[in-house]
Amino acid sequence: MPEHVIALDQGTTSTRAIVFDRTGASVGSAQQEHQQIFPRAGRVEHDAAEIWQNTRHVLEAALESSGQDAAAIAAVGVTNQRETVIVWDRRTGEPVHNALVWQDTRTQPRIDRLIAQRGVDAFAEQTGLPLATYFSASKIAWILDNVEGARERAAQGELLFGTPDTWVVWNLTGGADGGIHITDVTNASRTLLMDLRTLDWADELLEVWNIPRAMLPEIRSSSEVFGEVREPAALAGVPIAGILGDQQAATFGQTAFDAGESKNTYGTGNFLLVGTGTEIVRSRAGLITTVAYRCGDEPPRYALEGSIAVTGSLIQWLRDNLGIIGSSEEVEELAASVDDNGGAYFVPAFSGLFAPYWRPEARGTLVGLTRYVTKAHIARSALEATAFQSRDVIEAVVADAGRPLTELRVDGGMTRNDLLMQFQADILGIPVVRPKVVETTALGAAYAAGLAVGLWSGLDELRGHWQEDVRFEPRMGADERTRRYRQWKKAVGKSIDWVDDDARILMGTEDPPPVVE
């Protein structure tokens, strides 16, 4: 039997593929960034065609770098940026519009109207989610309402919707020539359209958003054989057997399968998940309820999630928009050149504040500036913002669970930054534990696929693969920790209530009222 799995990780800023052996070790990989498109303030788009081309490239390149061929690959697993919306023509495979990324806030006016009518938690009992631009439903509706002819074509069954997992699997399995149109329960649970109890699209929610059911993919489990690869040819015939949203995949890769187990992923944003087992738990502290995974016909497992919109993307912003670093890797050295943040606190509410605040009108704020502050202090405050935001969601977890965390398992690209990980431990007052494999998102997708084809016997075998790499112990005194966190909360308060009618007009997200003669 083949003893390797290839995982495709279609992320917010790049697409990568990693080949894993049966011990969970990486033996080959490839990665390619894709364009970030910002048509105007509040809008974030991707070129779905570019993502598909990059997908083909990284799969072929990763396979080549591993020294293996298709005969050595037992299965393909897919993980992806969640909530991002792609709508395309089922006959041609052409997207009707750029993908609307999960960070995009153009639908806020419609969300505001619904909140005014029904309340922010109108659909939370059914979906586990508050009303927010973050989730897919309002983005699908926007495309149908704003792309000429889209609503009519959708009603006639000509258009398909999917999050990026659906898009790449459809193309991998043949596209317009017989591609399968599916998603898994974890991605479906992020749309504001799926009922957490039935694991099916809710007709009453489709009616709210005026979305035809025919557009939507079939909802499947996270670990089962879905179909076979047709493109790229180098992997033709290999079964696609795992699909997980990226944060659920990271949880799976951390082997946090059971109730009470958690992980925090540091990527474009940060995402803390805490498993609740087969029980659907409603948060009282600003977290959302989501599906963690489902293996085959087994009952689904659920989780509470604290979603933070901007962490790693803030470092990209320092690089691309301000130019104070030449590469993301340089931020650690620059930040380490000063002893502290110089009194500067950075609240990166570029898309509003997500968990636990859910304040869409907040915007990015840099406070505490004096002539003393340098670019090094700003770099340090950007890293510290990641740790402070993570403490915010961990405080919410503790409030919901009624018991403190004793340690935090972490993963994702930013965890290679030792300065950040040490500060995270300091500001939490608990150990932060980094595993030997930090790219657990891809690993989780590989595990889900390998389980479905029998490469691994079960979850217990996967637990045996997890290995600790570095444990960061807190060094900061309790008084200092409290003082710094208090300042952070003060800075958060300064970012709130920024967006109003004047701000929308000045940012170009709303047209000014007509002049009355």
Image: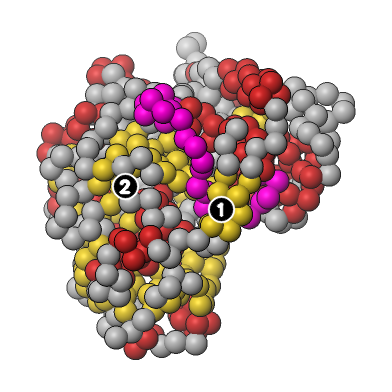
Label for residue 253?
A: none
Q: Does residue 83 appear in this view?
A: yes
Q: Position of residue 247 (x, y in %)?
A: 41, 49
Residue labelled with disc 2: 258
Task: Specify start and end residues of the magenta stretch as a single range.
Answer: 396-420
Residue 351 point in image, percent of width and height: 51, 34
Q: Tell me which corner region of the image, top left, top right, bottom left or bottom right, holds residue 482.
A: top right
Q: Is residue 361 left or right of residue 339?
A: left
Residue 160 visible to an observer of this rendering: no
Residue located beneath label 1 in the image: 434
Q: Is residue 96 left or right of residue 406?
A: left
Q: Residue at x 33, y 27 (%)?
A: 283
Residue 122 against residue 275 in the figure, above or below: above
Image point (35%, 40%), residue name: 260
Residue occupying the far right of the picture:
372
The amino acid beneath tag 2 is Asp
In the image, 186 versus 280, the foreground residue is 280
Is 44 placed left or right of 335 in the picture? left
User: Residue 474's spot in the image, x, y percent?
Assistant: 65, 37
Residue located farthest toward the top when viewing the structure as drawn: 517
